[in-house]
Image (spheres, grey):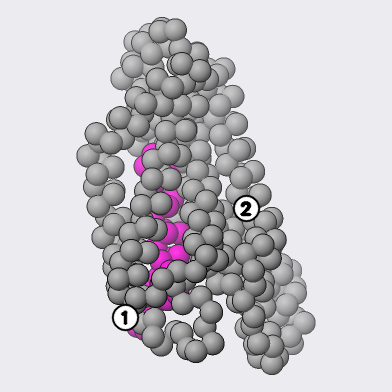
Amino acid sequence: MTGLKEILWKELSDCFNSKRFVVLFLLIYVAGIATVYIASQNIRSSVDDSTKYIFLNLFTTSGSSNPFSFPLFMSIFIPIIGIALGFDAVNSERVSGNLSRLLAQPVYRDDVINGKFLAGVIMMALMIFSMVILVSGLGLRMIGVPPQAEEILRLFTFIVISILYGAFWMSLAILFSVLFRKTSTSALTSIAIWMFLFLFGSLIAALIAGAVLHTSTQNASVSDIMQFDNLFRMISRVSPGTLYSESIQAILLPSMGTSSPTMMVIGIYSGLTPTPLPLTQSLLIVWPQIVALVALTAVCFAIAYIKFMREEIRAT
């Protein structure tokens, strides 16, 4: 336990003293301020007298001329943070020779990788928590509407889900850091997977669903659209980005009675009025997505852990 604590504090100290993370912090804060400014300028057009959670609209309202919003911003930057925290966690220590010298000390090998992972999770939690607090403080000053207790709980749940999402990308980056010797290779592989899923995940899922069901968008009935949406969602949930977006949509948009925006639109056109759900009901809707994120993170870290524990590390 002492070795784990020492590794944890060492990694946290390296993160706080690193110019890379200072620049990353600044970029995230600038982008966060931009999102809350856009939301505050357009929030009057997105709320009315029947709106129950006005403060949450700060985190969901986008610009009138662009779709940039806080959830979109977080879905882009959280993988970057996770990859930046994990792509050189092991291979940089191995190449420099610090890893062999570190393991020559009275430190267990599993304390090294566990300490690096825990330090990364703590850094990510600090970034996400401070970002939400910054947006909340600026938004409170701009709109003058304090959050309700339900909104505070939803924002806390949003922070937890965001940390889980970032932990997956960090564990994936740590896995590639263990598998590959060069830090550039592990970084490029992690970024390539993220970009592929972000840009082409939904497109591939739609092509597969359309090919299986032979659904035509011109003459499709409501039942055909529902079948297509169900299959499309099932395939696209292979991507962690889809799991994350569905989770935060249900948490930040209480009126969504489903994780599918398509089903919500069909319900509105059918004459159904969306009613805000309590937090417990929203959590029940997205609980499978949260469990899937935790499982993916655990699988990636377990593979990295086993590979790291079994590999031979020689002094250089």
Give the left or right position of residue 30, taking residue 278 as reference: left
Percent position (x, y) of residue 10?
34, 24
| Residue 269 lies in the magenta stretch | no
**Is 268 rendered above or below residue 182?**
below
Tell me the amino acid under the disc marked 1: Gln
Percent position (x, y) of residue 206?
62, 69
Residue 141's quadrant in the figure?
A: bottom left
State which region is magenta.
57-85
Q: Name the residue under label 1.
A: 41
Front residue of 172/138: it is 138
Q: Main secondary structure of the magenta part?
A: helix
Front residue of 222/260: it is 260
Q: Which residue is drawn at 34% across and 77% down?
A: 143
* Res. 306 in view: yes
Q: Residue at x 53, y 79 (%)?
A: 52
Front residue of 287/143: it is 143
